[in-house]
Image (spheres, rainbow, N blue to C red):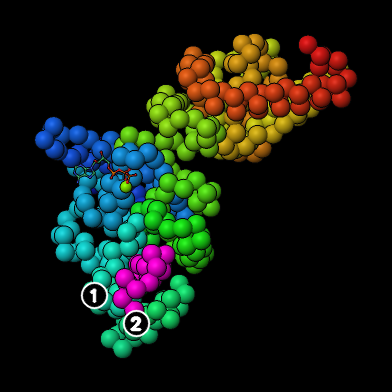
């Protein structure tokens, strides 16, 4: 029997067969129309987030972050593509009310502006989701809500209305409400956007605690001090996801350049021991390491090889040769026992972006300087005497 090409309806099955995936988006397109016509906000997003990951999402205002989260929560629906969350294909054959119940049990949502019901006490606000999806017995609900308020340090304010506590405390209550039904996934849209630094820190520490329990947390934020605390940072630029190897290797690059590199980059895989760059040969690409390790190898006076450095995921090489326009001064080869996966950018594209992005060029120049010095020192140590030039 001829095997049919993989279609969207096969994707849900594939997703179910990947038990580690909490969120899978494939080819997600979102279009909006307004008076000026139709415009595309998400341009074919593919993204997988695994169980237990703490993920931050960043991007300029209007880049599509909230729209992306709304695709995951089922608050809005994609124009095209597939979204599987916690093993469920949330837009296929599911009614709005089924999706709403499913959401109540499977995910907690936290917004920038808390959205607590103003006429209910904090305790009642936290009980609301349990009532809605009918989880926990009627008698258990207030007890559980109080425990959650204790968890976020608000037990003393349980019987107060939201307006009578600080904004930071309102957000903590909203977080208690989001985890009321013990969902495996927490999605937060700029949860600290309206908070002072101290309250923001409390929020992140709570999130870290949820992650430690095995929950998945996905958070949109503008705050770089928070992205450094997550496992993984996803950048969205103009409705498209930037390749994470590129943002890790070149964090100073402007988002539009990262996106350009995402589109240009090609994948190259090298087997252990294989030469990637040969000494004395011209170098035509800038290499970024996605996985595996590479050895940078020099020769000593006796023509004996020695490893001058060992680079891994999120590091790059080839820049030295590209920027100096010369031939390779070292051999670079796949080290370790695993294949090395790289992303490569052709020389002309790399040089153009460096010219357009002085901050990145400067950062790379700093690394080039360091590496040159390291190599010269190593050369001298090896007695080659070719260090001075
Ligand atoms: N319901 C809607 N109808 C029409 N256009 C929309 C709608 N929602 C969002 N947009 C547009 O889609 C684009 C992306 O919006 P989105 O809210 O996802 O951006 P964002 O990255 O979350 O920005 P911010 O950082 O300002 O929150 C914007 O141009 C916005 O105006
Ligand atoms: Mg937004």
Rendering coords of residue 344 (x, y %) = 51, 24
Q: Range of the magenta residues?
A: 159-179
Within 10 Å of disc 1 (Cα), the crowding (few <14, some 14-19, many 20+) is few
Indicate whether residue 258 is drawn in magenta: no
When asked about the image quadrant of residue 307, the answer is top right
Q: Nearer the viewer, residue 71 or 294?
A: 71
Rendering coords of residue 39 (x, y %) = 19, 34
Q: Is residue 315 above or below residue 148?
A: above
Question: Residue 31 vs residue 334: left or right?
Answer: left
Residue depicted at x 13% and y 38%: 34
Task: Give the CA separation, mark 1 to mark 2.
Answer: 11 Å
Q: Residue 159: which disc?
A: 2
Q: Quadrant of the N terminus?
A: top left
What residue is disc 1 on? 119
Residue depicted at x 24% and y 75%: 119
When asked about the image quadrant of residue 143, the answer is bottom left
Question: Residue 63 vs residue 292: left or right?
Answer: left
Indicate whether residue 167 is drawn in magenta: yes
* Residue 373 seen in render: yes
Q: Quadrant of the C terminus?
A: top right
Rendering coords of residue 22 (x, y %) = 38, 56
Rendering coords of residue 62 (x, y %) = 30, 39
Residue furthest out toward the left: 35
């Amino acid at each position: 029997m001829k095997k049919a090409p993989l279609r969207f309806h096969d994707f849900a099955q594939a997703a179910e067969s990947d038990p580690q995936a909490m969120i899978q988006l494939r080819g997600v397109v979102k279009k909006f129309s307004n008076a000026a016509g139709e415009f595309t906000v998400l341009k074919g997003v593919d993204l997988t987030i695994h169980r237990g990951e703490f993920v931050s999402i960043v991007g300029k205002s209007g880049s599509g972050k909230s729209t992306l989260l709304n695709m995951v929560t089922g608050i809005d629906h994609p124009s095209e593509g597939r979204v599987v969350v916690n093993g469920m294909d949330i837009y296929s054959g599911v009614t709005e009310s089924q999706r709403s119940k499913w959401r109540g049990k499977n995910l907690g949502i936290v917004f920038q502006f808390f959205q607590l019901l103003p006429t209910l006490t904090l305790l009642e606000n936290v009980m609301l989701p349990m009532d809605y999806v009918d989880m926990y017995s009627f008698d258990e609900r207030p007890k559980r809500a109080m425990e959650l308020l204790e968890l976020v340090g608000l037990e003393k304010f349980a019987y107060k209305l939201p307006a009578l506590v600080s904004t930071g405390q309102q957000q903590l209550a909203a977080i208690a409400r989001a985890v009321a039904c013990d969902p495996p996934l927490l999605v937060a849209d700029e949860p600290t956007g309206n908070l002072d630094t101290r309250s923001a820190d409390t929020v992140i520490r709570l999130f870290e605690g949820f992650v430690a329990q095995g929950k998945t947390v996905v958070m949109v934020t503008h705050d770089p001090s928070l992205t450094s605390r997550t496992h993984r940072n996803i950048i969205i630029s103009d409705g498209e996801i930037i390749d994470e190897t590129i943002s890790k290797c070149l964090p100073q690059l402007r988002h539009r350049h990262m996106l350009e590199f995402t589109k240009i980059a090609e994948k190259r895989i090298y087997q252990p021991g294989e030469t990637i760059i040969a000494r004395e040969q011209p170098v035509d690409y800038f290499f970024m390491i996605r996985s595996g390790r590479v050895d940078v190898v020099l020769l000593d006076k006796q023509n004996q090889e020695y490893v001058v450095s060992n680079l891994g995921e999120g590091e790059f090489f080839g820049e030295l040769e590209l920027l100096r326009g010369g031939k390779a001064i070292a051999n670079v080869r796949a080290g370790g026992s695993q294949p090395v996966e790289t992303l490569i950018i052709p020389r002309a594209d790399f040089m153009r972006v460096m010219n357009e992005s002085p901050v990145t060029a400067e950062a790379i120049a700093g690394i080039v300087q360091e590496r040159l010095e390291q190599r010269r020192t190593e050369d001298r140590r090896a007695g080659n005497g070719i260090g001075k030039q």
